[in-house]
């Protein structure tokens, strides 16, 4: 097999310019394209993985084990992931007219490792887990060297993490994966991944989601021999039910798998989970979505997001992706647009804007509150001390960028603030001109974590209530001039919380109006 496409160097350079240094140490393959992938010496990879030691072991997939490796660059150690694979017997099969010479490399003639090398070398992209190089071990097995993703897989984050990600981060991951798939489908010839699932979405050092594992991917047009001859493959639970024979394959199969991933992101449920009835996430979620019960499909560990309209938009696009008729599913361009629209809504929602204004104002102040108690929306970037934006890619530079919260504070962990809260927190004194007293405990409504519950609890009140340790329940008045809640007995931080509650209440009317819009006709549910 010839690795004709050697395209990885720009990707490598994007990720780490030090990869250039490796050129001197390894055999380099170049083509008329601009990128280079490297053929490493096996001994180099043995050294880099400490002889494939247990300490370097990252995980195991269906094709082999994955190890963390430190390659010696000229300036620094470069951390990569090395995927080991077993030599698979290539079946000698005949194609049309029994002429195997015509084979341009179908799935049966190419091992998953070779396939991954071949495809990844042609479509380097910052949204993908890019190829750095490869190697052949003494037994003829291929080893693939790819970018190291230090924050594990989306599957682990969703299903094994003690603190599951919050809505902002979930939706951001969804948009990033959607863009990755859109890029693949939009390349020429298109690439169909065929194995989109949460364990193949890895999280990079900037907490961005990247699509990896191209062992099953196919590059070519549907009429190409390779695509036509490769038998269906994928992962149970994510596999398109329309994809029963090679000729059934289309980009819409990836759309189906992406829809499952989206439902998984929203619900925190595995694609197939026998603890539920029905076990399939589609059979469980789609009827609820059709009924308009969007809150019912939300991950119970984090409750519904504050913005139900945004939730509805994302749930509906997920349901459209998993429609049983492939032609009725949207393309990935449309999926990305829908998710972007939801993001815009999120950024322009009164809740987010008022919170952001507030955040900007206190940027240089000490943390207002002990946030780990206050918040269950894990969207805070602890390393950089700021909030994650949904996606700060170049093509989205109109969107709001990272919002700084605080620069100082006893710990970054403690400066985490977010929009969903359901538990008790403790306020902290402000640095300058602060009116709040230290360590005043404020108990928030238990219903705040779920928007629907919170809104309804607000609507039952004639005013806004706050419970404080000293004063008990306190009624607040809305200031006509400022449009915020003020009370002479309250500190600035308490006023902020109350103001925030009021904004949510004001937003209720808009949400209600939007949710009343029927799904039928608009999305064509009845026609399926
Ligand atoms: N580039 C990487 N950086 C860091 N960890 C990785 C990387 N690639 C894979 N891993 C880890 O190694 C494990 C195995 O990954 P692999 O892609 O081989 O299998 P999988 O996707 O879990 O399953 P399957 O092979 O069935 O698709 C995963 O748990 C993943 O977290």
Image (cartoon, helix red, strand yellow):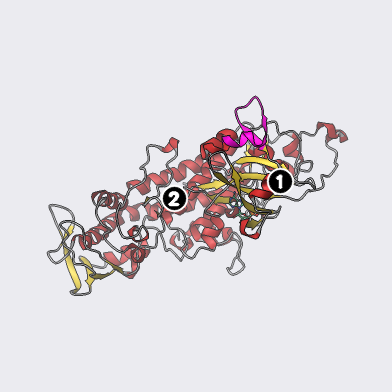
- The label shown at residue 455 is none
Q: Is residue 227 magenta?
A: no
Which of labels 1 and 2 is toward the front?
1
Mark found first going from the N terminus, 1 or 2: 1
Q: In this rendering, is residue 338 above or below 168?
A: above
**Is residue 268 at least partly visible in the picture?**
yes
- Left or right for 115, reference 280: right
Q: Residue furthest top?
A: 32
The region drawn magenta spans: 20-38
- Give the residue furthest to the front: 74
The crowding category of the residue bearing disc 1, from other C-alpha atoms within 10 Å (few below 14, some 14 to 19, many at least 20), is few
Q: Which residue is mark 2?
A: 313
Write down the quadrant of residue 189 in the picture: top right
Q: Residues within 10 Å of mark 2 (few under 14, many from 20)?
A: some
Reading the image, the residue beneath label 1 is 43
| x 37%, y 55%: residue | 307
């Amino acid at each position: 097999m010839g690795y004709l496409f050697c395209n990885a160097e720009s990707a490598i350079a994007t990720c780490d310019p030090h990869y250039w240094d490796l050129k001197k140490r390894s055999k380099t393959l170049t083509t008329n394209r601009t990128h280079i992938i490297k053929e490493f010496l096996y001994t180099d990879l043995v050294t880099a993985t400490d002889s494939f030691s247990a300490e370097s072991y990252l995980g195991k997939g269906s094709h082999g084990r994955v190890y963390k490796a430190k390659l010696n660059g000229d300036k620094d150690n470069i951390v990569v992931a090395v995927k080991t694979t077993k030599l698979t017997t290539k079946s000698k099969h005949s194609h049309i007219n029994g002429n195997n010479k015509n084979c341009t490399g179908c799935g049966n003639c190419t091992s998953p490792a070779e396939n991954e090398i071949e495809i990844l070398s042609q479509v380097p992209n910052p949204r993908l887990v890019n190829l750095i190089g490869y190697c052949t071990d003494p037994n003829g097995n291929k080893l693939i060297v790819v970018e190291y993703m230090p924050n594990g897989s989306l599957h682990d984050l969703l299903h094994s993490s003690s603190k599951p990600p919050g809505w902002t981060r979930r939706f951001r991951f969804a948009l990033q994966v959607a863009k990755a798939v859109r890029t693949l489908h939009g390349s020429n010839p298109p690439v169909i991944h065929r194995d989109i699932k949460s364990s193949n979405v890895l999280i990079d050092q900037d907490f961005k989601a990247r699509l990896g594992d191209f062992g099953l991917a196919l590059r070519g047009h549907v009429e190409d021999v390779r695509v036509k001859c490769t038998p269906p493959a994928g992962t149970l639970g994510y596999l398109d039910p329309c994809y029963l024979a090679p000729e059934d394959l289309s980009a819409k199969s990836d759309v189906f798998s992406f829809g499952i991933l989206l439902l998984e992101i929203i619900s925190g449920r595995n694609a197939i989970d026998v603890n539920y009835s029905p076990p399939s996430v589609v059979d469980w979620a789609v009827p609820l979505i059709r009924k308009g019960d969007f809150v019912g499909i939300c991950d119970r560990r984090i409750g519904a997001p504050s913005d139900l309209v945004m939730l509805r938009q994302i749930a509906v696009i997920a349901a459209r992706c998993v429609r049983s008729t492939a032609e009725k599913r949207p393309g990935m361009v449309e999926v990305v647009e829908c998710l972007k629209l939801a993001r815009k809504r999120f950024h322009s929602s009164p809740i987010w804007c008022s919170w952001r204004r507030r955040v900007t104002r206190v940027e240089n102040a000490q943390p207002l509150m002990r946030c780990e108690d206050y918040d269950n929306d894990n969207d805070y970037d602890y390393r950089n001390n700021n909030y994650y934006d949904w996606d700060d890619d170049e093509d989205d530079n109109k969107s709001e960028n990272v919002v700084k919260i605080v620069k100082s504070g006893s710990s970054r962990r403690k400066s985490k603030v977010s929009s969903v809260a359901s538990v008790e927190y403790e306020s902290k004194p402000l640095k300058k001109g602060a009116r709040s007293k230290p360590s005043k405990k404020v108990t928030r409504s238990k219903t705040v974590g779920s928007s629907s519950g919170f809104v309804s609890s607000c609507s039952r009140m004639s005013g806004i209530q706050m419970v404080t340790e000293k004063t008990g329940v306190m009624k607040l008045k809305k200031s006509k001039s400022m449009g915020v809640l003020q009370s002479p007995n309250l500190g600035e931080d308490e006023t902020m919380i109350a103001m925030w509650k009021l904004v949510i209440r004001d937003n209720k009317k808009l949400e209600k109006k939007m949710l009343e819009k029927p799904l039928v006709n608009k999305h064509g549910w009845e026609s399926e």
